[in-house]
Amino acid sequence: MDSTPLRVDRADVRQTDDGLTLILGAAGVHVMLIRLRYDGWADEVINSAGSVANGSGAWTLIGHELSLELGTQTAAALGFPRDCRLDLDMDAAAIRRVRAALLEILQSACFVVDAPEGRIAG
């Protein structure tokens, strides 16, 4: 599978009674949704066709590049590479929203993220 980074120019965060969703899009089209469902505290990744699979095992957000390490079954189900890279073509405020949402949604995943305090790993 091609590991060319997917370009993303929009990030929205939606919170409902059922969960928290980070919506990543480009040119008005959803590229990927990353969702935490409060029922069972399960994180999920959703592709643009609406297919849903288990969330990421690990992730990094360094500068404007988001990398998600997807399991073999998740990558195959969604049509993404296992090392799914997204180029976040957005301003600093949007990057902060993405970072905050990912830290909440993907709580159980290993991560490395740039933060105002420096690079943080968990």
Image (cartoon, rainbow, N blue to C red):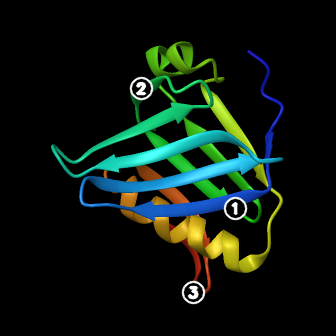
State the count of labels. 3
Residue assigned mark 2:
53
Residue assigned mark 1:
62
- Are there few (<14), some (14-19), or many (20+) residues within 10 Å of tag 3? few
Q: Which mark is residue 72?
A: none
Q: Which numbered disc, 3 or 2, marks the residue closer to the eye? A: 2
The quadrant where residue 99 appears: bottom right
Helix, strand or loop at mark 3: loop
Where does the image place residue 47, in percent across and percent down from the top left?
A: 58, 30
Question: Of label 3 and label 2, which has the lower sequence position?
Answer: 2
**Real-space Cα distance between discs 2 and 1?**
24 Å
- Are there few (<14), some (14-19), or many (20+) residues within 10 Å of tag 1? some
Left or right for 42, reference 59: left
Is 51 above or below relative to 15?
A: above
Can residue 122 be seen here? The reply is no
Where does the image place residue 79, in percent across and percent down from the top left?
A: 63, 17
